[in-house]
């Protein structure tokens, strides 16, 4: 979608940094970003437009977003946005499925407002009692842990002193026990929070459940009719395994700035998967690791097609197969207008539920004596690939991983500073949720070093390069 001439002229007047062409090209993206972000924040999280404009749509992301006005229709459950209040792009809300650009709204419903479950962790949300017996010399340094957490909410403590880290939640699970749960004003343990790329690991878990049911296999090829309609299309050779490990070979540009593919895919396309699937093959599948949000969204469309489920059953699949069995009450997985879950980016979930998911992976796919994921699938998710140099496997990052060997530390990581760090050996899960587009605002490695020291956990250094 390109701006009309009069709109292009307007946008040229808004371009303040010499990025004239990029600004014009990004107009639908900017409008979609404003519409979709506000739709989820207002109808799911119950936040105000003013609050969202300060952070997710604030000047630190792009000061020009302030020129894209929004119209919030609470009866329809829709948000339209564009320059001068024009309805340039619209995002619609469906209760239980969140928001999607290009989809009509189905009513605002009610924001997800849940109260903590008073039962003990992990079934409930109450902090765990101290262990009956502390191991000599290994007692948690409570003061050091509390100082590390307190500093996570202070400007400049873990990064650029001039940038607000905008930490929203810190949750610490150690030896399987919930020992800390701290949140910024306006957020709490049950607030559904933005995943960004942490959703990728949850997507892999859903594929693992389908694989256990015999509906999908890592070796499957010829995955989309768009790739098999013409004989000789090289994309027909891409396998599920290639998509899981970011080895598709598609020419997707994972650049989050102007001209990159993720923003257009997420905010200006009705089908995230088909946008990514339309990219030409750059190199042979399975020949190189290249981190691509497009691979994940293609994977989720393939999962839907291979599931054999009706539209209604597929809409409920994440909840029925994963969220309900684990008691993840706050989880909302958003789709695009075509009905595919946007597995790369748009899962909203409360901090305690992110910690539960991490603990399930730490425990080999088990949660409260129930096998949620097959142990062999979790083993796969826990073993880094050779092409990634020990950094990645099955939509999951590693710290200090060794190709072919089970990783000691797994990590879900998302743009804006969202992390779930997992040390299976000690059943440690560290959740940090926040939002800041400036990566210098948050030093995850420094934060983890202090937390690990307080917990007496030995963990490797970061070796990611995303």
Image (tube, helix red, strand yellow):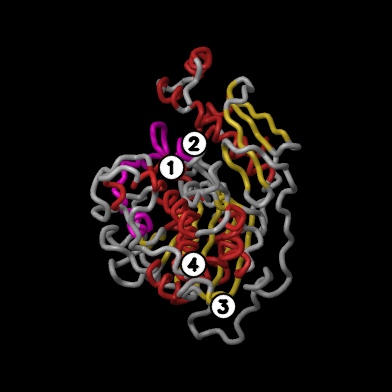
Comparing 166 with 424, the one in front is 424
Q: State the residue in front, 382 or 213.
A: 213
| Quarter location, residue 71 | top right
For image coordinates 52% across by 49% down, the residue present is: 340
Of the numbered discs in the image, which one, if any, rests on residue 370? 3
The residue that mark 1 highlights is 274
- Residue 258 in magenta stretch: yes
- Disc with the residue nearer the chain's start (2 vs 4): 4
Residues at discs 1 and 2 in contact (Cβ within 8 Å): yes
**Is 76 within the magenta?**
no
Q: Is residue 463 visible?
A: no
Q: Which mark is residue 209?
A: 4
Pick whichever of labels 1 and 2 is earlier in the sequence: 2
- In three-dimensional space, the C-alpha distance between marks 3 and 4, rounded to whole angstroms, equals 14 Å
Q: Are marks 2 and 4 in contact (CB under 8 Å)?
A: no
| Depicted 369 relative to depicted 87: above or below | below
Q: Secondary structure at mark 3?
A: strand
**Which one is earlier in the sequence, the residue at label 3 or at label 4?**
4
Residue drawn at (57%, 65%) of the image: 322
Q: Residues within 10 Å of mark 1 (few under 14, many from 20)?
A: some
- State which quadrant residue 121 falls in: bottom right
């Amino acid at each position: 979608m390109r701006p009309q001439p009069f709109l292009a002229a307007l946008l040229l007047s808004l371009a303040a940094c010499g990025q004239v062409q990029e600004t014009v090209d990004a107009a639908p993206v900017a409008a979609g970003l404003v519409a979709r972000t506000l739709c989820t924040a207002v109808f799911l999280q119950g936040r105000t437009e003013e609050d969202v404009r300060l952070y997710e749509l604030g000047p630190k992301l792009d000061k020009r977003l302030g020129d894209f006005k929004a119209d919030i229709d609470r009866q329809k459950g829709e948000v339209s946005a564009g320059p001068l209040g024009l309805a340039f792009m619209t995002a619609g809300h469906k209760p239980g499925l969140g928001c999607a650009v290009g989809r009509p709204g189905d009513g605002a419903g009610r924001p997800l407002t849940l109260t903590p479950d008073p039962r003990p962790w992990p079934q409930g949300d109450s902090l765990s009692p101290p262990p009956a017996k502390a191991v000599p010399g290994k007692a948690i340094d409570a003061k050091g842990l509390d100082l590390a957490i307190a500093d996570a909410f202070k400007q400049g403590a873990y990064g650029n002193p001039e940038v607000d880290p905008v930490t929203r939640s810190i949750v610490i699970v150690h030896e399987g026990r919930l020992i800390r749960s701290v949140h910024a004003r306006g957020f709490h343990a049950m607030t559904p929070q933005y995943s960004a790329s942490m959703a990728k690991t949850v997507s892999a878990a859903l594929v693992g459940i389908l694989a256990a049911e015999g509906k999908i296999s890592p070796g499957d090829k010829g995955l989309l009719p768009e790739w098999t309609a013409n004989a000789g299309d090289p994309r027909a050779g891409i396998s599920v395994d290639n998509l899981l490990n970011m080895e598709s070979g598609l020419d997707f540009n994972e650049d989050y700035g102007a001209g990159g593919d993720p923003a257009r895919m997420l905010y200006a396309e009705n089908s995230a998967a088909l946008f990514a699937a339309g990219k030409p093959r750059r190199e042979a599948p399975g020949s190189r690791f290249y981190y691509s949000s497009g691979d994940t969204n293609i994977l989720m469309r393939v999962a839907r097609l291979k599931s054999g489920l009706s539209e209604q059953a597929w809409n409920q699949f994440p909840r029925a197969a994963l969220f309900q069995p684990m008691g993840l009450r706050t989880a909302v997985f958003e789709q695009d207008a075509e009905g595919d879950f946007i597995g790369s980016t748009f899962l909203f979930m409360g901090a305690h539920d992110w910690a539960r998911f991490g603990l399930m992976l730490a425990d080999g796919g088990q949660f409260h004596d129930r096998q949620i994921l097959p142990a062999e699938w979790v083993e796969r998710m826990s073993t880094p690939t050779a092409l990634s140099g020990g950094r990645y496997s099955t939509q999951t990052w590693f710290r200090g991983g060794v190709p072919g060997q089970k990783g000691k530390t797994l990590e879900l990581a998302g743009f804006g500073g969202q992390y779930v760090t997992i040390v299976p050996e000690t059943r440690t899960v560290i959740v940090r949720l926040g939002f800041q587009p400036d990566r210098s605002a948050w030093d995850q490695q420094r934060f983890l070093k202090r937390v690990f020291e307080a917990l007496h956990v030995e963990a490797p250094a970061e070796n990611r390069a995303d």
